Amino acid sequence: MQRRATRRLNTQPATRYLGEPEGTRIADWLNAAGKREEKRRFISLLDHLKGFAIDLRRGVARFVGPDGAMKLNGILSGYSYRLSFVSDPDELFKLAVIPTAPARGNARSVTTEAMMVNLLMFDLWRLGRVDRIRQCQQCGRWLFARLAHHRYCPGTDCARKSNEAKPSFKARRRAYMRRYYAAKLSAGSRSKRSGVRKSK
């Protein structure tokens, strides 16, 4: 008796990239409208952390050591918050970050959402993926780069548009169109001479 071959569906989940959920939430928050001052502070902290990460990889001592820690702590002193346990129907105890009124002169009040985004960024720092939060080189929107070489928004035409704007692409396209129209015109003139009518 012959067994019938059955086709199995691919039931494996889509590929998950390290830090992708956190990075996507941060990018969505940065792309949302409003909260300019909080975003400006966040981007400043993000740029410092990126520089710190790059210097650590290269072994440069500019940010490494107490001076780098003091610089980052100076930026973080601008945030005022407290940790608190809150009741949650899903969990017995849930830890929440609650912004507080500024206690010191340089501290600023921060929304809960901005504080959570900062904590997500430090999760990315711990995973070594803080440098993956970047702006698209074509449209300027924020994105989380799944791979280190990604520079454009995923699933959009940004990469194609950027490539089409390059002079080398334009030169290749011009040369291709010249050959294409030369072949098309020569084929059209041959059909007229032979009396063959083109079908539509």
Image (cartoon, rainbow, N blue to C red):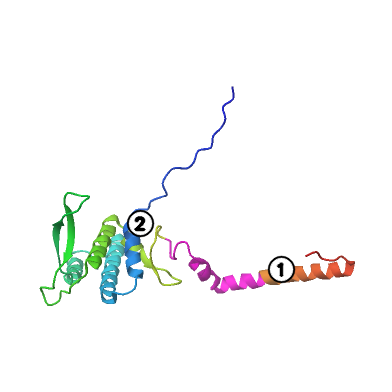
Specify start and end residues of the magenta stretch as a single range.
Answer: 149-175
**Can residue 115 be found in the magenta stretch?**
no
Q: What's the residue at 43%, 43% (across, down)?
A: 12
Q: Quadrant of the C terminus?
A: bottom right
Give the percent coordinates (x, y) of residue 197. 85, 66
Q: What's the residue at 19%, 64% (across, down)?
A: 65
**For mark 2, does the 10 Å Cα neighbourhood hold few (<14), some (14 to 19), or many (20 or more) residues?**
some
The answer to whether residue 58 of the structure is visible from this angle is: yes
Say what secondary structure mark 1 lies in: helix
Q: Are marks 2 and 1 in contact (CB under 8 Å)?
A: no
Q: Quadrant of residue 198?
A: bottom right
Give the percent coordinates (x, y) of residue 183. 76, 68
Give the percent coordinates (x, y) of residue 53. 29, 63
**Can residue 165 be found in the magenta stretch?**
yes
Residue found at the very far left of the displayed protein: 103
Q: Quadrant of residue 143?
A: bottom left
Q: Earlier in the sequence, mark 2 or mark 1?
A: 2
Determine whether, in the image, residue 183 is placed left or right of residue 151.
right
Determine whether, in the image, residue 179 is placed left or right of residue 153.
right
Compared to residue 83, the image places residue 181 above or below, namely below
Q: Which mark is residue 180?
A: 1
**For mark 1, does the 10 Å Cα neighbourhood hold few (<14), some (14 to 19), or many (20 or more) residues?**
few
The answer to whether residue 61 of the structure is visible from this angle is: no
Residue found at the very far front of the displayed protein: 89
Mark 2 sits on what residue?
A: 20
